[in-house]
Structures are given as C-alpha cells and as structure tokens.
C-alpha cells in the first residue's frame, strides 16, 4: 500500500513500480491515513513523506503492529535527524529511507525478494 502526503503525487514512482512488472500495485497512492484500516495482506508499505504529514505516526504504528516493512520516500533533507519523526522511524527495525525514484524501485525489489512476508 502506498501512502502520500497531500503535497506529493507519487504518480511517477507508482508508474515506475507498475511498469517494472515485478510488483502488484493495485491501488493508487492515498493521502488518507485512515486507509491503514484496510491493510490486511500487504507485504510492504511505502510512504511518500513530507514534514508534518498528517497520520504519519498512525501509518508507522500500523506497520509495526502488523510487522510489515516500510519504506519512507522523502526528499533529501526532509527528515530532520533527531526530530520526532526521525525518532519514530528509528524505533522500527524494518524500515528503509530513500529519496530518489530508482532507489525506491531498488528498495521495493530488495525488500520483497528477501523479507519474509509477514502481513497479518
């Protein structure tokens, strides 16, 4: 499942993931953090992050509760080291942070290829 902040489109990134034909990305990115209620059998959560993102804590908490790896896709410098969001992210071992589209595709491939699916 792909979440995004209201000021990000994630269109290019979603298209890259779909066009690779390696991944099943059935839903469009959502800026509604309440959609965490629909995470059932997902192998990965991607967050198009920006500082002050509504529902970020809820999304990360859901990933932790369901033991689903999470990729934080953030513009370079968007996550302040030592800030509240940085501390939240660091509290979950199954996370990756990236900031360019090709790295996102690489991280998705690597995580889904090597991490045991734990979606509950």
Image (tube, rainbow, N blue to C red):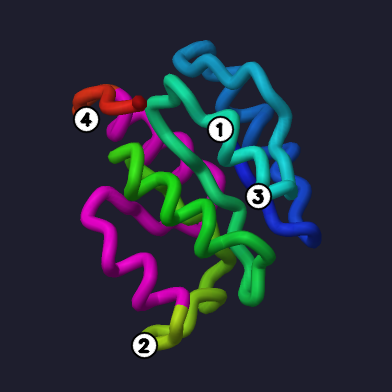
Is the C-beta separation of discs 4 and 1 under 8 Å?
Answer: no
Q: CA distance from mark 1 to mark 3?
A: 11 Å
Is 49 drawn above or below residue 1 in the view shown?
below
Q: Quadrant of residue 75?
A: bottom right
Q: CA separation, marks 3 and 2?
A: 24 Å
Q: CA distance from mark 3 to mark 4?
A: 24 Å
Q: CA distance from mark 2 to mark 4?
A: 27 Å
For label 4, the residue is 115
Q: Nearer the viewer, residue 27 or 61?
A: 61
Q: Which residue corresponds to the image point at 40% horizontal and 58% vertical from the top-left?
A: 97
Residue 33: assigned label: 3
72 or 63, which lies in front? 63
Q: Is residue 73 left or right of residue 93?
A: right
Question: Callout 2: helix, strand or loop?
Answer: loop
Decide which of tag 2 and tag 1 comes sooner along the chain. Answer: 1
Q: Quadrant of the N terminus?
A: top right
Compared across the picture, whether 104 is left or right of 112 comes to right
Tag 1 secondary structure: loop
What residue sits right under mark 1 in the picture? 1
Q: Earlier in the sequence, mark 2 or mark 4?
A: 2
User: Can you say which quadrant of the picture contains the C terminus?
Assistant: top left
Residue picked out by circle 2: 82
| Main secondary structure found in the magenta portion | helix
Q: Position of residue 54 (x, y in %)?
A: 68, 65
How many numbered discs sit on the rendered protein?
Answer: 4
Q: Decide: is 91 above or below 100.
A: below
Residue in view at x 52 percent, y 52 percent: 59
């Amino acid at each position: 499942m792909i979440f995004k902040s209201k000021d990000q489109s994630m269109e290019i990134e979603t298209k890259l993931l779909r066009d690779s034909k390696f991944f099943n990305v059935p839903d469009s990115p959502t800026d509604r953090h309440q959609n965490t209620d629909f995470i059932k059998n997902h192998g990965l959560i991607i967050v198009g992050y920006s500082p002050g993102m509504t529902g970020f804590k809820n999304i990360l908490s859901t990933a932790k509760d369901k033991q689903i790896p999470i990729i934080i896709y953030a513009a370079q410098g968007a996550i302040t080291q030592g800030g509240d969001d940085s501390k939240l992210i660091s509290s979950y071992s199954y996370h990756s942070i990236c900031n360019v589209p090709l790295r996102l595709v690489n991280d998705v491939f690597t995580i889904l290829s090597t991490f045991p699916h734990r979606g509950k």
